[in-house]
Amino acid sequence: MVLSNCGETITPTGPVIVNAPDPLTCQGTRTYQWTYTDCEGNSHPWSYVYTVVRLDFTVPTNGAATVACPALATQPVPPVVLSNCGETITPTGPTVTNVPNPLTCEGTRTFTWTYTDCANHSHTWSFVYTVERNPFTVPANGAATVACPNLATQPVPPVVLSNCGEVITPTGPVVVNNPNPLSCEGTRIYTWTYTDCEGNSATWSFTYTVERQPVRCSRQWRQHG
């Protein structure tokens, strides 16, 4: 309450609101100003000043997941982040970091967004995929029985895919005869080794069993007269 020099209560006019900057959307000052004028025209202003200083905001804990293949490390949805005053902050990004680069087998893929409020408080949020290959499978081993060693010829190994669908080129074959050399009966085994990019390994074999067939004999009869 403001009194005139003679003790009367002076009713102010106002307030006039002054924002700096104007409009005041982030940081700055807002001033409310009243003017007190007595009956003689003596006048004085009175002001109340708010200083707006933004407080920092927070982001959620970074995300993470483990996947079996690089193709599964897809861009996630970044979280909704609010400024300290409740406005939604639109992030920039993502920045994508592969280790190793390019990421073709195992490693990490990180998606990073940057959130910045109007007062330039800034924080990043990341999602890290760890690519860990799973073992693959091969078909059941093959087998056949043949009558002669020369029929135990090299078969065609099966097409085998990694756990992520890539065709694996095998090494081999390693050929094992039992007995060695295989000249009559026994087994001949062809073995291939399949290894994916991570080092997961499996073998596939084809075993021939050589089983001789009985000899067919013909008799010739000669008639004596």
Image (tube, rainbow, N blue to C red):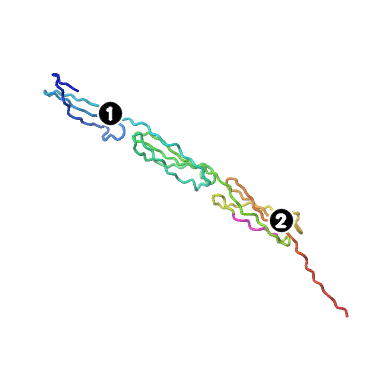
Identify residue type, mark 1.
Tyr
Which residue appears at 21% of the width and 25% of the height? Answer: 46
Q: Quadrant of the N terminus?
A: top left
Q: Which residues are magenta?
A: 152-159
Q: Is residue 38 magenta?
A: no
Spatial distance from mark 1 to mark 2, Cα to Cα? 92 Å
197 or 43, which lies in front?
Answer: 43
Counting from the top left corner in percent of width and height, residue 148 is at: 73, 61
Residue 212 vertical placement versus 56 (above, below): below
Q: Earlier in the sequence, mark 1 or mark 2?
A: 1
Q: Label 2, on which residue?
A: 188
Counting from the top left corner in percent of width and height, residue 140 is at: 63, 54
SS at circle 2:
strand
Q: Label 1, on which residue?
A: 50
Residue 217 vertical placement versus 81 (above, below): below
Mark 2 is surrounded, within 10 Å at the Cα level, by few (under 14), some (14 to 19) or many (20 or more) other residues, namely many
145 or 9, which lies in front?
Answer: 9
